Amino acid sequence: MYKVMIVDDEPVIKKGLQCFIDWSVLECEVVCEASNGIEAVELLDYYEIDIIVTDIRMPGMDGLALSDYVHRNSPQIKVIILTAFADFSYAQTAIQYEVVDFVVKTNPTEQIPRAIEKATRLLEKEREQMQKVRQLESKLNDNLTEISEKFLKEVLGGLISDELSLLSRSRELGLELKNYFGVYMEVKEIPGPQANSSAKTNEYHRFLASIRHFLVLAFGERPSYIMPMEKNTLLALVSMDGSNASVSTQTLLTISNEILAMAENFRQYHVNIGISLFHRDVLSLREAYLEAREALQGSFYNDNYVAVYMPYTGKALTPGAPPHHAAEQIAGHLQQGHSELAIQQLDQLLENYRSTKEPIENVKVACLLIGSYCFRLLSTSTPFAPEIEESQSAVYKQIQESTSIQLLTDILKRLIHSCSRAMAQNDIQPNYIVIECQKYIRENYNQNLNLQIIADHIHINSSYLSRLYKKVTGESIIDVINKYRIEMAKKLLRNPASKVFEVAEAVGIETPAYFTHVFSKYTGMSPKEYKLNYSQTELG
């Protein structure tokens, strides 16, 4: 049975939805109800909800703000919005929150079942997808038996090296190692306050499981083998589609950056990743392993780091020329706002490659790595920066198809300039938006006011505004609106002639009961208690 929450400030609507819809036929059960979005959010901490049916207009947190919250925090929950005819065009803005359907209030009992069926079909489809993921995970766990893992580790350690044994044993064990990379990952705990040893161990295993889960999704049906190596390290052997080393390297860099971003979100671990060259068969398995390990060595100086192995050509390289060092320095210059120094660093690296006639595949791998660092810098340092002119996949494609080092130079210079502009704009824009938001709240706190209305006034996406305001100020917009209203209400309540319901209406809260709830939440006492305390203080 799917669990349903009904959210509406009109008791008659809530009662009607519960009584006049045969929920059991829809394979659903109404497990709780709320009068507004704030109550709904609190109930989500106590109930596992599959579907929310919510009114669009409610005091406090309305249906759109609730949809936004669910979309950001519990995206697996399906939301259905109840709306009046007059609200319908307004309600369509909720499409960005992936709302399942809009149901007109005038005749909900006919339309709700259709909307519920639509939501349950989506839930069922997602459950089927999760089942496929579990099957892939099971395949991953099953395809590397103890015997297979022992064989692979003996090969990696150099204990089995003759060609006949390698080919025959890998065939016997059903190992598919063609057109593959070695990806070596090291997980390091970030030093911090001492925690319970058991809790830390559980968190560490949960993090490793998350990496394995992500790799299963990322590699999909590609043959891949993931095994623990030395302490805190994993080795993934990944067979790629086709035989284009450059395209495959791009794919692995993208996957690696996702892993690094996941590590940063956990905030307790650093992950460093080394990627080998492209290898054709099991005969070079140990070589792939050693290359991936060597690529990882640069992490001695860095955290959350990815590098691709670059073979030594025997030609002298200028200081700072190794591609991962150059990529780090370029990203560092960008982060400090020195795009001209980033360009100089790029010119130095590519001119060195030009003079030494570095193999073109090595040059392209280096350029992919620089692009990877630039895009990761944008996503981690400036999460609210506007999108740059060209997408990551488009830049990678241009690098792969380049026919000269000059074209590669032009591509990366455009990327550096785009990143620089985006980051500069990001430094200015958040403060302006927050100031405009606060100004609008002060001027309109006594009107119907919510996240969507403020976003419409500033002409930006409401989800973007919510995340940005929280990041810059540490508070949600709903909290700021309520706090400002309560501060204004305190001033009005100090007048002995003031009535609670009049004050509630004066600060933009139409329902006296809800005003009392909000006032008590932020002050620890009811409006009447506040009036009494203030009066006694004045008399004293």
Image: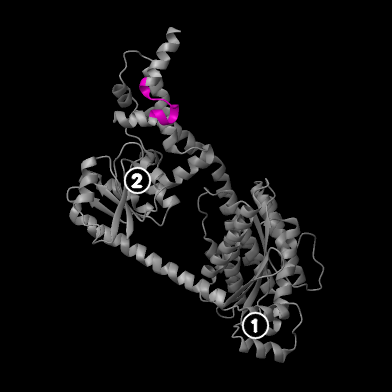
Q: Is residue 419 visible?
A: no
Check the image and name the residue furthest to the top.
539
Q: How many labels, in total?
A: 2
Main SS, magenta region, reads helix
The residue carrying mark 2 is 64
Query: In the displayed structure, would residue 135 be above or below residue 3?
Result: below
Q: Are marks 1 and 2 in contact (CB under 8 Å)?
A: no
- In the picture, measured across the screen, residue 286 lies left or right of residue 66, that is right
Q: What amino acid type is highlighted by mark number 1?
A: Arg
Q: Which badge, 1 or 2, comes first in the chain's sequence?
A: 2
Q: Quadrant of the N terminus?
A: bottom left
Q: Position of residue 120 (x, y in %)?
A: 31, 62
Instruction: Name the residue located 63 percent from the left edge and 52 percent from the top edge.
Output: 268
The residue carrying mark 1 is 280
User: Label 2: how many residues lie within 10 Å, few (<14), some (14-19) or many (20+)?
Assistant: many
Q: Which residues are magenta?
A: 519-528
Q: Is residue 376 visible?
A: yes
Q: Quadrant of residue 446?
A: top left
Query: In the displayed structure, would residue 102 be above or below residue 443?
Result: below
Which of the pair 459/339 is nearer the observer? 459
* Magenta stretch contains residue 522: yes
Q: What amino acid type is highlighted by mark number 2?
A: Leu
